[in-house]
Image (cartoon, rainbow, N blue to C red):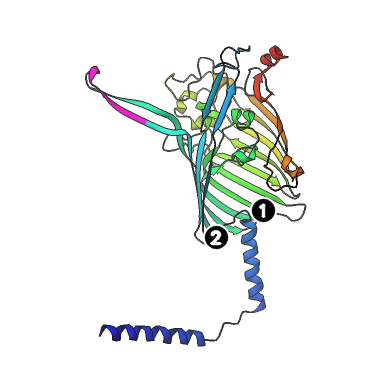
Amino acid sequence: MKKLTCLFALGFLLFNNTLRANEPEKVTSTEEVSETAAKKERIKQVTKDDDYEKFRFGGYGEMVAKFMNYGTNRFYGGVDNSDHRNTIAIPRFVLAFDYKFNSKWILGAEIEFEAGGVGLETELENSENGEYETEMEKGGEVALEQFHITRLIHSAFNIRAGHLIVPMGLTNAHHEPINFFGTSRPEGETTIIPSTWHETGLEFFGSFGKGYARFDYQAMIVAGLNADGFGRDNWVAGGKQGLFEQDNFTSPAYVARLDYKGVSGLRAGVAFYYCNDVTANADKNYKYSSVGRSSVKIYSADAQYKNKYVTARGNIIYGDLENSSKISKVTLSNNSNYYHGAMRNVAKNALCYGLEAGLNLSAFFSQKKCPVIYPYARYEYYKPAGRGRRFCYNGETLSGKQMDGRS
């Protein structure tokens, strides 16, 4: 009986396949073919940087060794070669994946393990009346850097929602190690604004134009900066939210960016950030009741040109903070994660700019096994507050007074 059942099932499958094979093929008109090809082309333009069919998994990491000829405080105004310090570390390890549900819906995520991650240890101290003590074993960070769902509609208009990269400056949108020279990210940019800057919100993006007049744009509504994190040393860089399970969305931020891509190898862009009231996003906003509404505006322009022989990049960032002197008078508890010391002194304006260029030596040799080596030069200037200016000298960033001492 079992054999007869199997033979019947096999016969049914063969009969079914025969009927399907004998069905007439559907005739597709020229208009339908053209419409399908046009749709595929539009999707291809939107996802032109994607080279995967369904699922993509990747990541990157960094290991950095530093040999420093200055003490623990390199900005104190002098040069002290007696305290040489050498360090080695893994600044970050990042895992990323993308998944295409179909040609219109894409899920993306990126998790960063910074400085070895985090770790807590609990001990029972019998010598102290059996008290439990919790100690921080690792001072790093595990962060959800990106997590978003994308709806592809048209090459000129698409929507993305979730945890997003804020594309201010040259480094944030292109923060992978292969996108900057040197072992560390540009110091000026990472000093005055958050890096990597990622917030939760909504993004609209797309491309328009053709030929030499091609542009990409982004428009975003995300969680705004928190005034508690503003200080003398890093201007608004410490104001990125994420300390708590929920971000304050009382005063959201609005971000716009436009990139020109009409010339092969050239990417030039401008961006604008605006938050109407950063004090409204403070942990305890009643402390800023005497300050009033305080907006922050950040402008940036950057460009990169790359060909077979040369890679050159440049950027400038300028920011304006309303009521900075009043914000400086608001004192925070010394056990707060935002404590800035007795002299908070937040600047009204901050500025940074930099240039770097590298030469690809392997391009001058016909041998395919020649390694890619880029000798480069970088110049940076930044002024987050009333401190001395910062310059790049022989690969190290020094204050104006230090430059005078070495010249």
**Which type of secondary structure does the marked residue at label 2 adopt?**
loop
* Residue 198 lies within the magenta run: no
Characterize the magenta stretch by its predominant secondary structure. strand
Magenta-colored span:
120-129
Residue 280 sits above or below residue 19 on the image: above
Residue at 23% across, 20% down: 126
Residue 81 sits above or below residue 22 on the image: above
Q: Distance of mark 1 from mark 2, alpha carbons?
A: 22 Å
* Residue 125 lies within the magenta run: yes
Residue at 73% across, 39% down: 361
Residue 323 sits above or below residue 314 on the image: above
Residue 310 sits above or below residue 122 on the image: below
Residue 390 lies, in percent from the top left, at 66, 21
Residue 194 lies, in percent from the top left, at 56, 33
Q: Amino acid at mark 1?
A: Ser
Q: Which mark is residue 356?
A: none
Quarter of the figure that contains the C terminus: top right
Q: Which residue is mark 2?
A: 53
Residue at 53% across, 30% down: 239
Q: Amino acid at mark 2?
A: Glu
Mark 1 crowdedness (10 Å alpha carbons): few <14, some 14-19, many ≥20: many
Q: Which residue is mark 1?
A: 207
Q: Nearer the viewer, residue 285 or 372?
A: 372
Quadrant location of residue 35?
bottom right
Residue 152 lies, in percent from the top left, at 57, 57
Q: Nearer the viewer, residue 268 or 253?
A: 268
| Circle count | 2
Q: Is residue 400 left or right of residue 113?
A: right
Q: Earlier in the sequence, mark 1 or mark 2?
A: 2
